[in-house]
Image (cartoon, rainbow, N blue to C red):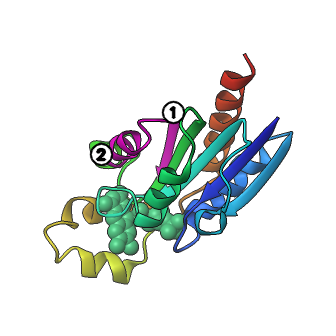
């Protein structure tokens, strides 16, 4: 079996989760930035990770998803400043699901990722960002040890799905 863990990360939060997921895969695997992936064929599973940006998926991840072959098994993960399990990050996953209509989506995982205070202050001034930026103040120290442990469990669940 062969896995690809592809991620986009600007400040390192999603990268940390990607590394945890790759660490939980005990067969042939590659860990790459989405921008560095040339060929998306030949994998039994692709994990695709991104930071939620403006309630949605960053363009680098959108480009990557478009390159994934039809029928390919894909699992999404993301980090976000807003509260885990809330409506705000859910919107981004729904967007990712829409982008992956021709692939087989196995599941998704999200956890919080810290945002620099300066950036929160700046984004709070913009109506488009206010809702999540308000929640993001308490995301300091994330992803934390619990998030990393949950990400590993998610990876194991996704692998169990393709091994069944
Ligand atoms: C420009 C910008 C827009 C963002 N938009 C959202 C958002 O809509 N919802 C949210 O929950 N977090 C949002 N965030 C917070 C990031 O998703 C979060 O900090 C993430 O962990 C960053 O991941 P990275 O370090 O891998 O880049 C935004 C951050 C920035 C800088």
Residue 107 seen in this snapshot: yes
Residue 160 on image: x %, y %:
71, 24
Extreme residue in the right direction:
27
Residue 4, relative to residue 142: is it above or below?
above
Residue 114 on image: x %, y %:
47, 66
Q: Nearer the viewer, mark 1 or mark 2?
A: 1
Q: Which residue is mark 1?
A: 105
Q: Which residue is mark 2?
A: 91
- Is label 2 in a helix, a strand or a loop? helix
Extreme residue in the top direction:
164
Q: Is residue 127 left or right of residue 103?
A: left
Mark 1 or mark 2: which comes first in sequence? 2
| Residues rendered magenta in the picture | 92-111
**Residue that appears at 40% across and 63% down:** 58
Q: Is residue 62 left or right of residue 28?
A: left
- The numbered dot on residue 59 is none
Residue 87 on image: x %, y %:
28, 42
Residue at mark 1: C-beta within 8 A of ligand 1? no
**Residue that appears at 22% across and 67% down:** 129
- Is label 1 in a helix, a strand or a loop? strand
**Residue that appears at 25% across and 63% down:** 134
Q: Determine if the magenta segment contains residue 90.
A: no
């Amino acid at each position: 079996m062969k896995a690809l863990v592809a991620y986009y990360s600007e400040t390192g939060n999603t990268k940390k989760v990607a590394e945890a997921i790759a660490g939980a895969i005990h067969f042939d695997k590659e860990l790459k930035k989405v921008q560095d992936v040339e060929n998306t064929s030949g994998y039994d599973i692709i994990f695709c990770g991104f930071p939620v940006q403006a309630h949605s998926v960053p363009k680098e991840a959108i480009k990557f998803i478009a390159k994934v072959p039809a029928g390919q098994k894909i699992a999404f993960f993301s980090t976000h400043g807003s509260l885990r399990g809330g409506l705000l990050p859910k919107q981004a996953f729904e967007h990712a699901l829409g982008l992956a209509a021709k692939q087989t989506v196995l599941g998704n995982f999200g956890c919080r990722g810290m945002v620099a205070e300066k950036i929160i202050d700046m984004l709070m001034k913009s109506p488009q960002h206010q809702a999540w930026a308000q929640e993001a103040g308490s995301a300091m120290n994330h992803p934390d040890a619990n998030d990393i442990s949950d990400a590993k469990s998610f990876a194991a669940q996704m692998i169990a799905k393709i091994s069944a």
